[in-house]
Image (cartoon, rainbow, N blue to C red):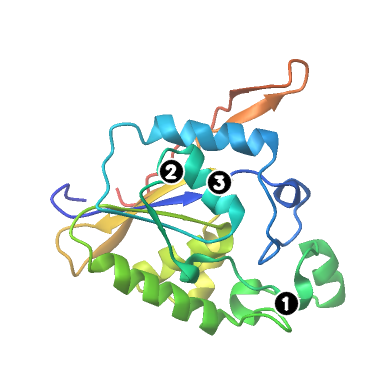
Amino acid sequence: MSNSFPSVYLARHGETAWSVTGQHTGLTDLPLTERGECNARQLRERLGGQTFAKVFTSPLQRAMRTCELSGFGSAAQIDRDLVEWDYGEYEGRLAVDILAEHPGWQLFRDGCPGGESPLQVAGRADRVVERVRSVQGDVLLFSSGHFLRMLATRWVGMESLNARLLMLGTASLSGLGYEHSLSQPAIWLWNDTHHVFIANEKKDVCEPRQLATNEVTR
């Protein structure tokens, strides 16, 4: 990847009560947990020294609060295309329970009854891609896990189903850019959680979490 090309940084929101339990959290507007706020503050250090031509955030409070605690609240613009997948009838449910009723179900292939289809979410992601590619300079986005996985897939021109292969932790940072030319979009950083902290059960504080950065273009 060449540093002469602009980059798009993807920040997933910090931990919520439902991200801990594994419940599908689409448009339910949950706040961050205490640990989620702690983790979001670590993004501020991770992004220290970085400047962005534009910062966009989902209007959901978990993304907006992460943006604020990361130090970019005053610069951020709300982009409603960045909201998480509308899970419809699957909102608040566990994947294991959905699969018990519908064996073989895959979100990025089948979508959700009463909610959005993969085509609809891909359409939103495509609009975001078009928007950020028109910006002269680096861009920072705050959003949610499934939407950001779709966005990365659409950035590199892959079919939506391939988003199932990309996992994202809470308060993670990822990077999209280009390799040798603007006609070669690439994912140069994925699911960086070095900065993420977990609660120390005894002291009830945040402690470093030892996870590796995944560089996927070299």
Going from N to C along the chain, the mark reached first, 3 or 2, is 3
SS label for mark 2 = loop
Task: Sort mark 3 into few (<14), some (14-19) or many (20+) by Cα contacts within 10 Å.
Answer: many
- Name the front one of labels 2 and 1: 1
Q: Amino acid at mark 1?
A: Gly
Please give the name of the residue rendered at 30% of the width and 73% of the height, measured from the top-left corner: 130
The relative height of residue 27 versus residue 102 in the rendered view (above or below) is above
Left or right: residue 77 versus residue 139 is right
- Name the front one of labels 3 and 1: 3
Cβ atoms under marks 3 and 2 closer than 8 Å:
no
Q: Quadrant of residue 45?
A: top left
SS label for mark 1 = helix
Task: Sort mark 2 into few (<14), some (14-19) or many (20+) by Cα contacts within 10 Å.
Answer: few
The relative height of residue 107 versus residue 19 in the rendered view (above or below) is below
Q: Amino acid at mark 3?
A: Arg
Q: Give the alpha-carbon distance from disc 3 to disc 2, as whole Å.
A: 26 Å
Left or right: residue 167 versus residue 28 is left
Answer yes or no: is residue 195 visible: no
Residue furthest front as drawn: 74
Left or right: residue 28 versus residue 161 is right
- Name the front one of labels 3 and 2: 3
Label for residue 214?
A: 2
Please give the name of the residue rendered at 50% of the width and 61% of the height, measured from the top-left corner: 58
The relative height of residue 198 versus residue 59 in the rendered view (above or below) is above
SS label for mark 3 = helix
Mark 1 = which residue?
88
Left or right: residue 119 versus residue 71 is right
Q: Give the alpha-carbon distance from disc 2 to disc 1, as whole Å.
A: 32 Å
Mark 3 = which residue?
65
